[in-house]
């Protein structure tokens, strides 16, 4: 007999298979019963690194909404592949400036970097709600 799959990871896996509208409705219903659980699920649903799965058009839409200082701070602890994904979706000049700024940046507090990444994820979720991009797990 197959053992039932339970827990937050299973819920997250199922939610990732849904379209954004259905996912939002289910998260809303969970939040009505347990706001803390809904917040935990939403936080674990997509990570900053998952932004590397965005198409060039979606990435460019996101970049138009993100302030340069926020992007600079958020990329501080990002993987090289995510950085390259963003660079590839910018003009050569903007990418070169961002690379230079990253190289010259002084150490930053992890909490500040995480806050910048969270801000970008909030913008991405807003754009997803507007139908301008589709978040998916990498």
Image (cartoon, rainbow, N blue to C red):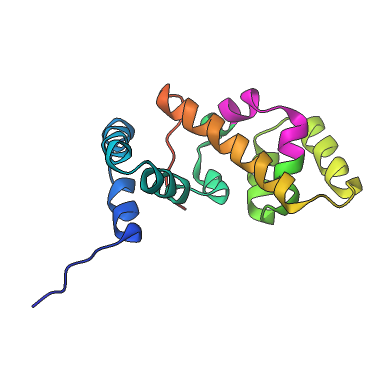
Which span of residues is magenta-colored? Answer: 60-72
Left of 120 or right of it: where is 26?
left
Where residue 35 sits: x, y (%)?
A: 37, 41
Nearest the eye: 17 or 7? 7
**Residue 59 rendering spot, x and y as whole percentages:** 57, 34
Q: How far across and down, in percent of the image, does residue 67 sit?
A: 71, 27
36 and 124: which one is in front? Answer: 36
> In this view of the protein, which residue sits in the foreground, 58 or 105?
105
Left or right: residue 99 versus residue 54 is right
User: What residue appears at the point 12 percent right and 74 percent down from the top-left corner?
Assistant: 2
What's the magenta bit mostly, secondary-structure-wise? helix
Q: Quadrant of residue 8?
A: bottom left
- Residue shown at the point (70%, 32%) measured from the top left: 90
- Is residue 41 inside the magenta stretch? no
Residue 38 on image: x %, y %: 37, 44
- Residue nearest the viewer, comparing 119 with 131: 119
Residue shown at the point (44%, 39%) measured from the top left: 135
Q: Residue furthest left?
A: 1
Q: Quadrant of the N terminus?
A: bottom left
Q: Is residue 62 left or right of residue 138?
A: right
- Numbered-mark total: 0
């Amino acid at each position: 007999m197959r053992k039932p799959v339970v827990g937050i990871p299973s819920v997250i896996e199922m939610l990732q298979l849904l379209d954004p509208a259905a996912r939002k409705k289910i998260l809303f219903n969970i939040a009505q019963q347990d706001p803390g659980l809904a917040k935990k699920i939403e936080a674990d649903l997509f990570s900053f690194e998952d932004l590397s799965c965005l198409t060039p058009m979606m990435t460019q839409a996101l970049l138009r909404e993100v302030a340069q200082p926020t992007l600079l701070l958020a990329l501080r602890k990002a993987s090289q592949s995510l950085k390259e994904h963003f660079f590839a979706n910018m003009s050569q000049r903007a990418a070169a400036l961002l690379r230079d700024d990253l190289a010259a940046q002084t150490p930053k507090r992890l909490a500040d970097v995480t806050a910048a990444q969270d801000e970008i994820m909030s913008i991405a979720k807003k754009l997803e709600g507007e139908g301008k991009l589709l978040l998916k797990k990498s």
